[in-house]
Amino acid sequence: MSALVIVLIVCAIAAAGFVLGRARALASAGGDIRGLHSLPSYYGLNVALAALLPALLLLALWSIAQPLLVERSVAAMLPDGVDSALVMSDVRRVADGLALAVAQGALSPQEVAALDADATDLRATLGDVGVALGSAVTPEILDAARTHRAMSATGDLWRAIVVIAAALAGTAVGWSVTNSALRARNLVERVALALLAFAASVAILTTLGIVLSLIFNTLEFFRLYPASEFFLGTTWSPSFGGGSELGILPLLWGTLYISFIALLVAVPIGLFAAIYLSEYASPGVRGIVKPLLEMLAGIPTIVYGLFALLTVGPLLVELFGNGGPLGLGWMDGGTAVMTAGLVMGIMLIPFVSSLSDDIINAVPQALRDGSLGLGATRSETVRQVILPAALPGIVGAVLLAASRAIGETMIVVLGAGAAARLSMNPFDAMTTVTAKIVSQLTGDADFSSPEALVAFALGMTLFVITLVLNVFALWIVRTYREQYD
């Protein structure tokens, strides 16, 4: 039985519990709602939650633990000296194919037990259900796949029985304690508060998990490669054959250089657009221009990358190349820092303008009226009253745009090139940290080698840079914040 079917059954039990709990509460009060401590719906919710929460928690824990236990048991059956990770991938693929074939009626359990690894009917049968075998299936893999399928099927059966039993038991317990004196509203509100607290902690727990995964792999990288050469090296030349030079400075320079150009484009245009829309534009103009600006945020970054590669890059070459009207010869190819920076700046305009517009509109109207009443012009009011009051939000918008620029990948890959170099020329091709993270983790990389683990060190470096930017922005906000009573 699939997890979705189990969830639907548990929800049906909870719905029945809601009806039964509500009816029992009314019956205990003699049908008079005034005799109840809480509204009847709270009694029904109390029973429904007693059925729903323990069952769903048990289902989640079981779904996480079962694959781990099954794979550990199956891995113990494999012969010594084999790559267990690679073999287990084949075992899972064959086991999933066998389970799908049984579910669709292409094979019976007896036929699964009689299959021969060397026979072509195994490959043909699995091919009929959409499972392709790229390599030969050995008898060991087939036996392990049979065991994997059998243990998974048994585990799924017991999971359904235990979870449904837990839902029924929770319903029975909630129904049995339901009476007119039960403080059902207090119980339901405590559960709701706990769920809200859990939802609030998800972001913190996710961040903690990301940081821990980065830290452990980064420490493993620094055991294989000197940290001093990584942070101070000026050459980026990975080689999976050995002899790599993995200096981060060229990548870091490219990242900051492209982000700086992008912010030079996005921040003034976005901020001025926000000021115009919030303070000067008529409602009709605002209703047209603001949605058009926000449409830029919905364009996929791959489209921006193609725009940089096919339009902006050739245009810059035509203007600043040898054959251009200026004859400057500054730019040889379409992939350059300027290409990626300009297109990325266009992409960031809605991030700055939309957030800044919302923050400016949140400034109390009384501040505007007071400034205008004292004789200030509209532009003076914007410059001396509104912008200082909205400074914390504007700093947040700029910080969001900077973080977006630092983490961008596709525009950099298509618009800036793949060269890791230290250069002040904005018309040179460069690359960024994010682009190299992708390239180092793409392909048949050995994850125990420095050339693969360096991606985690690069990610950890970006995380620290972003953290420093946040702390610096917080200091700016606290220093220049304007507070009003």
Image (cartoon, rainbow, N blue to C red):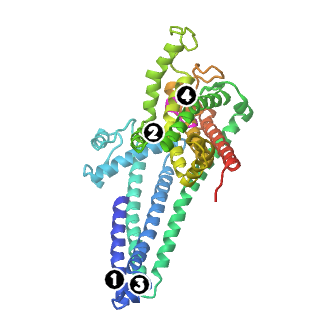
Q: Amino acid at mark 4?
A: Gly
The answer to which of 20 and 291 lies nearer the viewer is 291
Crowding near the residue tagged with mark 2, few <14, some 14–19, many ≥20 C-alpha atoms within 10 Å: some
Callout 3, which amino acid? Ser
Q: Nearer the viewer, residue 277 or 302?
A: 277
Pointer 1 residue = 23
Q: Earlier in the sequence, mark 3 or mark 1?
A: 1
- Which residue was labeled with disc 2? 297
For the residue marked with disc 1, what is the amino acid? Ala
Quarter placement of the C terminus: bottom right
Query: Is residue 286 visible to us here?
Result: yes
- For the residues labelled 4 and 1, say whether their Cβ atoms are less than 8 Å apart: no
How much space separates mark 3 and mark 4, taking CA atoms?
Answer: 66 Å
The image shows residue 224 at horizontal and vertical percentages of 68, 36
Instruction: Name which of mark 3 and mark 4 comes first in the sequence.
Output: 3
Q: Which residue is mark 3?
A: 176
Determine whether, in the image, residue 340 is placed left or right of residue 292.
Answer: right
x, y (%) of residue 367?
Answer: 58, 52
Q: Earlier in the sequence, mark 4 or mark 1?
A: 1
Q: Is residue 364 within the magenta segment?
A: no
Query: In the picture, residue 135 is in which quadrant?
Result: top left
Query: Could you say which disc has been placed on residue 462 in the image?
Result: none
State the mark number for residue 341. 4
